[in-house]
């Protein structure tokens, strides 16, 4: 095979080698979720967009794909919020400020920021779905005049599971966005809404044609939320989701994330409902029959 | 490029001349089957063979490939492989060469895969054309891989007393040039080759019940066909079919630590879309549960997705998946069943 046309640097390097990075801040939001602020070596910018993810590399444990939860408008660092669930994330939860880890990426597509420009934005976050959406919310709030009405609907299991508590308080207080929150199960101090996130949608005021709905949550949530959004007559190509899949490489090679010929790591993780429908049979998030 | 000739009796002599160009791997009999293995002497080889248990991918996409070495404290990475081996793949069938061409496309796609490319760059491919069917489960004629279509340095075609030598690269040229016993092809030899090719063309015909246009249509319309449930019910999930496939390259990445836990190696190993946990994430959510969905995925990975992406079938028709299947799932029968179910005229 002729490989002459492939530069020597590529033959001598490896896209599997991560960049060195340092944890500069941690915060334990819940027993399960921990926040990490990460600085790449030399304070280099990650160069990501909201919705993209990185492969976090802990030598001896392996890699895990994690959404970036800070806006690229914040320079010199980026944030991750990680649920303790697999072997890499368990080990990551034991890490503290000053510890080093490896980062590859950013990978994948971002939320369609250009198309969302000037439109009304409806953000629907269920559980850990708020993590990638925090990057989008920060981005939108930083460029607030570039967008129309902004609404955030946030749902979690119990008030104790709420992430980004201080920021959530700020979102609630702001007058330039609408914010609504619900829990599946309340505790005695909870004064807000109780019920699944789908119960917040019928009451929301939405101008469907000019709205981009961005939905991120557990797989089961999509089917029910998308049905509600379709009832509101939001066009299929303006319902935006982010899919979770098993990934090993992030570069469209290992194939674990392939669904109906689509690599979630490259052509996703951000998709529109219109795109999900074309993956019928392999993508249960998109199976919303109305 | 050009054609030459070699007498069958001289092949062993030529083989000996290749020994200093690198390690030679070729087909060898192993119990009731064949394998690619290191060859020391020409006589060890079995050039007339049915496709080997594993395809030659093991030489440029090893089952366990070292990606890099690392140190934990302080964090550091370094090359895991200092130098790659120079080697010759001797006697590869055209179906397997087609498989190599598929793998090339994937691993040359950006970002390029340096492990693969470094190994492939050091590989010389000497093909051996099949003049008749190896057995009844091959489907090479359907996908057109029964004839040489590039991807090799040299191709040998049996013409009775001698072999036609198709020289297809500068590297191939360097292996035969200056050898008086490998003369350029004469007009007469050329006619002999043409005759052999014509005879061969009469023996090979599409193994599916219809041509590939109909197969394409069957796949386009057959995603929800009951054929997949039938296949899924019979599949035992052993993953043999993907291990032996010349175009299967799914992998997992893992770390291996040294005993003192301060350094280790990151490596990749062959994975399989037929594994139960292939698409299962840490939360337990399984995005492709069921053997029916997983078998369907395997077939679409050969007959539709790569056609959409690279305009190329990733089935080489070698028949290995059928030969190795513990549940006797046949690729030809499955494709035919799909044609019956979905591709029939409406």
Image: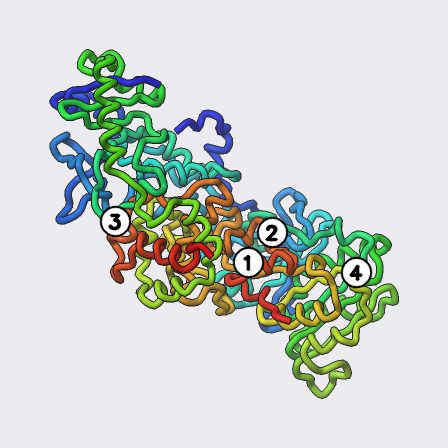
**Chain for mark 2?**
A
Disc 1 element: loop
- The local crowd at label 1, few if under 14, some if 14 to 19, many if 20 or more residues have their Cα within 10 Å, is some
Left or right: residue A288 versus residue A210 is: left
The residue lying at 74 percent from left, 66 percent from top is: A233
Residue B192 spot, x, y in % from top left:
21, 21
Q: Which residue is mark 3?
A: B137
> How far is disc 2 from disc 1 in space, using C-alphas?
38 Å
Residue nearer the viewer, B334 or A173: B334
Disc 4 element: helix
> How far is disc 4 from disc 3 in space, using C-alphas?
55 Å
Q: Quadrant of the N terminus of chain A?
A: top left
Report if residue A37 is visible in the image: no
Quarter where residue A41 is shown: top right
The residue lying at 18 percent from left, 21 percent from top is: B14
> How far is disc 4 from disc 1 in space, using C-alphas?
24 Å
Q: Which residue is mark 1?
A: A279
> How far is disc 2 from disc 3 in space, using C-alphas?
55 Å
Q: Which residue is mark 4?
A: A209
Disc 2 and disc 1 in contact, CB within 8 angstroms:
no
């Amino acid at each position: 095979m002729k490989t002459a046309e492939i530069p020597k640097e590529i033959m001598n390097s490896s896209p599997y080698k991560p960049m060195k990075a340092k944890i500069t801040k941690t915060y334990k939001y819940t027993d399960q979720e921990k926040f990490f602020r990460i600085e790449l070596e030399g304070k280099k910018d990650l160069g990501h967009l909201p919705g993209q993810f990185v492969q976090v590399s802990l030598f001896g444990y392996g890699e895990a794909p994690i959404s970036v939860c800070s806006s690229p408008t914040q320079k010199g660092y980026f944030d991750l919020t990680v649920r303790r669930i697999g072997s890499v994330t368990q080990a990551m939860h034991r890490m503290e400020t000053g510890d080093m880890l490896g980062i590859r990426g950013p990978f994948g597509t971002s939320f369609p920021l250009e198309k969302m420009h000037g439109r009304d934005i409806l953000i629907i976050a269920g559980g850990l779905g708020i993590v990638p959406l925090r990057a989008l919310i920060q981005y939108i709030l930083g460029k607030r005049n570039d967008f129309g009405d902004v609404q955030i609907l946030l749902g979690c299991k119990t008030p104790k599971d709420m992430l980004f508590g201080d920021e959530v308080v700020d979102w609630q207080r702001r007058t330039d966005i609408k914010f609504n929150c619900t829990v599946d199960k309340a505790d005695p101090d909870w004064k807000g809404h109780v019920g699944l996130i789908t119960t917040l949608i019928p009451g929301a005021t939405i101008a469907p044609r000019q709205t981009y709905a961005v939905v991120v949550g557990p797989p089961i949530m999509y089917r029910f939320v998308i049905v509600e959004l379709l009832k509101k007559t939001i066009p299929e190509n303006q319902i935006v989701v982010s899919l979770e899949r098993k990934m090993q490489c992030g570069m469209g090679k290992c194939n674990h994330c392939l669904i109906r010929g689509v690599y979630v790591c490259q052509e996703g993780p951000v998709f529109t409902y219109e795109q999900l429908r074309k993956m019928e049979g392999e993508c249960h998030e998109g199976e919303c029959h109305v | 490029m050009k054609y030459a000739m070699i007498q069958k009796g001289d092949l062993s002599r030529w083989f000996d001349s290749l020994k200093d160009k690198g390690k030679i791997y070729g087909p060898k009999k192993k119990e009731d089957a064949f394998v690619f293995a290191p060859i020391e002497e020409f006589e060890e080889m079995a050039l007339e063979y049915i496709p080997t248990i594993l395809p030659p991918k093991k030489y440029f996409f090893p089952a366990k490939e070292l990606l890099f070495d690392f140190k934990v404290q302080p964090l550091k990475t370094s090359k895991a492989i200092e130098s790659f081996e120079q080697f010759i793949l001797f006697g590869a069938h055209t179906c397997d060469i087609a498989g190599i061409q598929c793998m090339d496309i994937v691993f040359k796609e950006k970002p390029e895969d340096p492990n693969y490319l470094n190994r492939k760059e050091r590989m010389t491919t000497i093909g051996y054309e099949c003049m008749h069917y190896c057995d009844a489960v091959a489907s090479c004629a359907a996908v057109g891989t029964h004839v040489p279509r590039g991807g090799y340095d040299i191709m040998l075609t049996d013409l009775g007393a001698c072999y036609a030598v198709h020289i297809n690269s500068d590297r191939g040229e360097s292996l035969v040039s200056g050898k008086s016993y490998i003369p350029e092809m004469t007009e007469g030899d050329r006619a002999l080759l043409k005759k052999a090719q014509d005879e061969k063309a009469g023996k090979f015909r599409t193994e599916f019940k219809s041509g590939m246009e109909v197969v394409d249509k069957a796949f386009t319309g057959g995603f929800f066909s009951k054929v997949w449930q039938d296949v899924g019910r019979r599949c035992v999930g052993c993953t043999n079919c993907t291990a032996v496939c010349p175009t299967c390259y799914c992998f997992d990445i893992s770390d291996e630590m040294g005993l003192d836990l301060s350094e280790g190696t990151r490596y990749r190993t062959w994975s399989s879309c037929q594994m139960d946990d292939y698409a299962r994430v840490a939360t337990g959510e399984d995005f492709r549960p069921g053997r029916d969905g997983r078998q369907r995925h395997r077939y679409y990975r050969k007959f539709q997705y790569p056609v959409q992406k690279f305009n190329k079938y990733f089935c080489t028709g070698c028949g290995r998946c059928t030969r190795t299947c513990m549940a006797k799932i046949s690729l030809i029968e499955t494709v035919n069943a799909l044609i019956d179910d979905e591709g029939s005229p409406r």
